Amino acid sequence: KNEVEQSPQNLTAQEGEFITINCSYSVGISALHWLQQHPGGGIVSLFMLSSGKKKHGRLIATINIQEKHSSLHITASHPRDSAVYICAVMDDKIIFGKGTRLHILP
Amino acid sequence: DTEVTQTPKHLVMGMTNKKSLKCEQHMGHRAMYWYKQKAKKPPELMFVYSYEKLSINESVPSRFSPECPNSSLLNLHLHALQPEDSALYLCASTLAGGTDTQYFGPGTRLTVL
């Protein structure tokens, strides 16, 4: 069983839809990252969470430490949000999820 | 300056070549990382430097040789690579390591012929 599971693996939605990407993990962590990777490679760190909720523009990330679960939400999705979203958990090392490939149709 | 730069962007090399990848940051970060990423897979940690000392080597073959000449620079020397080493090589840095936010470079896409 993978230590970090993301769902869904792939998601196609229409522009404007509310998007939720989930991340569950089985190890003890001290922080969790949500990362965005566009085609071509560059990775951008969106959020680092250790508790509660963070919001940046149209992006919201939440984490429930007791349930070992985090979600990334995108409101009013746009084609430029199309990317791979990766959940990574951190304790003494970083463990990446396999990513969720998001495609927003205009 | 919140940027991690990597050069070159693309590299094609033969199995007998020697080449180097370069990573640079001027954020005063003291931990720097090399990751390897195959297509449609998450990044895999290769090496971590902390305060210019190698702190983690994830059992990477010796044909990959990291070097941290100073706190702003991280190199990855490549020699006698195999075609299966073709991948995107990502560099990242954090303020002091641990659970600090990682800042990623754009990556070097390496093709080994």
Image (cartoon, grey):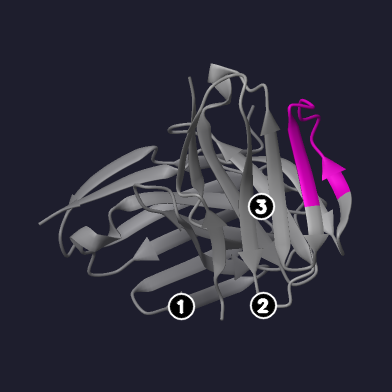
Q: Residue at x 67, y 33 (%)?
A: B78
Check disc 1 and give the amino acid type. Lys
Q: Position of residue A55 (x, y in %)?
A: 46, 78
Part of the protein shown in magenta: B55-67
Residue ranking furthest to the front: B17
Q: Which mark is residue B27?
A: 2
**x, y (%) of residue A8?**
39, 41
Q: Amino acid at mark 3?
A: Val
Left/right of residue A44 with respect to residue A9 in the rendered view: right
> In the picture, which quadrant includes the C terminus of chain A?
bottom left
Front in this rendered view, residue B88 or A7: B88
Nearer the N terminus, badge 3 or badge 1? Answer: 1
Task: Please say whether residue B1 is one of the residues in the magenta stretch.
Answer: no
Nearer the camera: disc 2 or disc 3: 2
x and y, in percent, of residue A16 in the image? 17, 65
Distance of label 2 from label 3 (alpha carbons):
23 Å
Q: Which residue is mark 1?
A: A55
Residue tagged 3: A89
Between B32 and B100, the residue placed more toward the observer is: B32
The answer to whether tags 2 and 3 share a subunit is no
Helix, strand or loop at label 1? It is strand
Give the x, y percent position of residue A36: 44, 57
